[in-house]
Amino acid sequence: MTTTQKSPNWLRVIQIGLGILILFLSIVVLINPIIGAISVIFFLAFLLLFAGIEKVISGLFIPGKSRFASIGLGIIVIIVSIIALAYPIDASIFVVLLLGIALLVDGISRIVHGIKDKTSVKWSKGFSVGVGVLSIVLAIIVIVFPGIGLIFAGILIGIALLVTGFQILSAGISGQQNRRTNDMT
């Protein structure tokens, strides 16, 4: 059973503040979508930096056969993450190019599957080939013009932030809090 009750005032103030902040950031990202894509790469590079540091520390202080592999791989992760932090635009373009290549391979796979599939009906095979061709066209656009891929990723991030900001803001304004209760009677 779900019951609704009012959230505490301090929680509502935090929700309203965070909702407004996220809405502001979403507008910034929608105005300049490349900022959103690069900020994701920057954030991921920081996470990898800390993961690499943890691997090196674990390798130094935890005995075992794999300690040198842990240290070596941790150092590689640290180096790659520092490069990504130093060159976030280039790292973003590299990631977009990798995704473009993955989309290209997926498109080719869909076309091959659509042509070779003997069990599907004709329209399904045609749909598979059509989606494959569309994937290849989009992949070529992203590979030739990686900035378009960055912009598209940034727009998606901006829209996601906008929706999230409105949801948090509305939760703070309404003060409604859903709680699940188990009614065992």
Image (cartoon, helix red, strand yellow):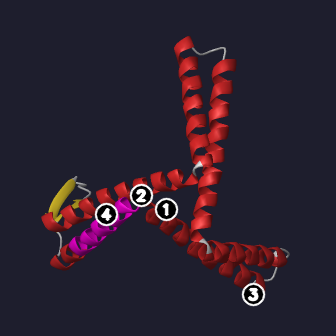
- Specify the label residue 27 is tagged with: 4
Front-most of 2 and 77? 77
Marks 1 and 4, Cα distance to the nearest angstrom? 14 Å
Q: Inspect the magenta stretch and tell me whether residue 45 lies in it.
A: no
Quick one: label 1, few (<14), some, or many (20+) residues within 10 Å?
A: many
Secondary structure under the numbered disc 4 in the rendered image: helix
Residue 28 on image: x %, y %: 34, 66
Please give the residue where the numbered disc 3 appears in the rendered image.
61
Tag in front: 2 or 4: 4
Marks 2 and 3, Cα distance to the nearest angstrom? 40 Å
Please give the residue where the numbered disc 1 appears in the rendered image.
37
Magenta residues span: 15-32
Circles 4 and 3: CB atoms closer than 8 Å: no
Residue 25 appears left or right of 39: left
Circles 1 and 2: CB atoms closer than 8 Å: yes
Q: Which numbered disc flags the more N-terminal residue, 1 or 4?
A: 4
Q: Which numbered disc flags the more N-terminal residue, 2 or 4?
A: 4
Q: Is residue 56 above or below residue 41?
A: below
Tag in front: 4 or 3: 4
Residue 51 appears in the picture as rendered? no
